Image (cartoon, helix red, strand yellow):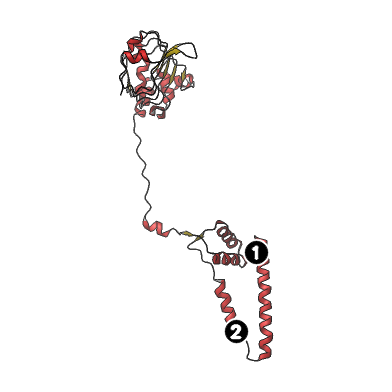
């Protein structure tokens, strides 16, 4: 924490800024309290107190010349109700990124008769209902708030004192936290887990697509195949075991006669080759 002493003021940079105004640069000094600004002898049009640790905008001396006060990136929560008595010609006030929360906290700014440009961006107050219209309504001389204009709409909304008081009360209400429902263990267990299919299951899914009886079943199996994720509740027929059963039945039906045994295996083998060729052709057409 650094005190704002007369020595610090005299040693700080001062220059003519881009709009030919005499400016005092006091930014980034970790100043916590405004004091001793009388040491400026009212020789500056602009004072920059940005990037400090100031909590209250108060303790200002009478600075008749000062037109712009830049005090963004501080911790301001309170403004002196009589600030206008000490800064009669202040037309620009930058309070960006401070800690103003409720609408009533900007009411002291009504004492600044010449205030035309005000920035309250990145303060919690900007999230309150009717924030912009309330501020514009209260500060009659204000032309630009947060770089925007809405004078006509503000005058219409706050035509009565009752509407003004209601807006103040609304801004002081705290938001209740929303509870997120917990998912029970039973619900988690009921949700089918997703697992990646094995190469054998991929072949089985492709075979199931070829042998599907309905378009819905085909679409479902294609979706599973493209996603690469197999729900645990999806049952894929075991075509390998089925082919083994067929093969065993064929072997039992083979007669003991050598001549018939030579002919029928050849026919079975040819039939299987034809079926495999047809299945491969179907898979090529599908993919």
Seen in the picture, residue 41 relative to 189 is either above or below; the reply is: above
Q: Position of residue 59 (x, y in %)?
A: 30, 15
Seen in the picture, residue 47 relative to 214 is either above or below; the reply is: above
Question: Residue 283: which quarter of the image?
Answer: bottom right
Q: Can residue 285 be seen in this view?
A: yes
* Quadrant of the rendering where the N terminus is positioned: top left
Question: Could you say which is closer to the camera, residue 219 or residue 206?
Answer: 206
Q: Residue at x 61, y 61 (%)?
A: 215
Q: Where is residue 123 in the image (x, y as percent from the top left)?
A: 39, 27
Instruction: Identify the secondary structure beneath mark 1.
Output: helix
* Quadrant of the rendering where the C terminus is positioned: bottom right
Question: Residue 13: which quarter of the image?
Answer: top left
| Residue where numbered disc 2 is placed | 251
Question: Could you say which is closer to the camera, residue 233 or residue 37?
Answer: 37
First in sequence, mark 1 or 2: give its number: 2
Give the residue furthest to the bottom: 257
Q: Residues within 10 Å of mark 1 (few under 14, many from 20)?
A: few
Residue 7 as seen in the image, left or right of residue 251 = left
Q: How many labels does the image show?
A: 2
| Residue where numbered disc 1 is placed | 283
């Amino acid at each position: 924490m650094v005190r704002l002493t007369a020595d610090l003021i005299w040693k700080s940079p001062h220059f003519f800024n881009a709009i030919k105004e005499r400016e005092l640069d006091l930014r980034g000094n970790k100043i916590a309290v405004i004091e001793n600004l009388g040491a400026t002898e009212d020789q500056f049009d602009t004072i920059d107190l940005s990037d400090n640790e100031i909590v209250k905008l108060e303790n200002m001396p009478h600075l008749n010349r000062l037109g712009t006060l830049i005090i963004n990136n501080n911790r301001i929560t309170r403004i002196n109700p009589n600030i206008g008595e000490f800064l009669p010609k202040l037309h620009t006030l930058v309070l960006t990124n401070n800690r103003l929360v409720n609408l009533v906290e900007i009411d002291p700014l009504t004492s600044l008769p010449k205030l035309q440009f005000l920035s309250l961006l990145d303060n919690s107050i900007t999230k309150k209902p009717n924030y912009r219209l309330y501020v514009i309504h209260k500060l009659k001389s204000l032309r630009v708030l947060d770089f925007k204009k809405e004078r006509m709409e503000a005058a219409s909304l706050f035509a009565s004192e009752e509407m003004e008081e209601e807006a103040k009360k609304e801004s002081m209400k705290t938001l209740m936290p929303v509870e997120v429902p917990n998912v029970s263990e039973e619900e988690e267990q009921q949700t089918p887990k997703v697992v990646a299919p094995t190469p054998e299951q991929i072949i089985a899914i492709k075979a199931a697509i070829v042998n599907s009886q309905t378009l819905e079943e085909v679409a479902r199996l294609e979706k599973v195949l493209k996603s690469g994720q197999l729900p645990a509740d999806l049952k894929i027929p075991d075509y390998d075991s089925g082919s083994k059963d067929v093969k065993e039945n064929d072997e039992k039906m083979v007669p003991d006669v050598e001549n018939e045994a030579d002919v029928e295996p050849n026919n079975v083998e040819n039939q299987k080759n034809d079926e495999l060729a047809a299945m491969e052709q179907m898979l090529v057409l599908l993919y």
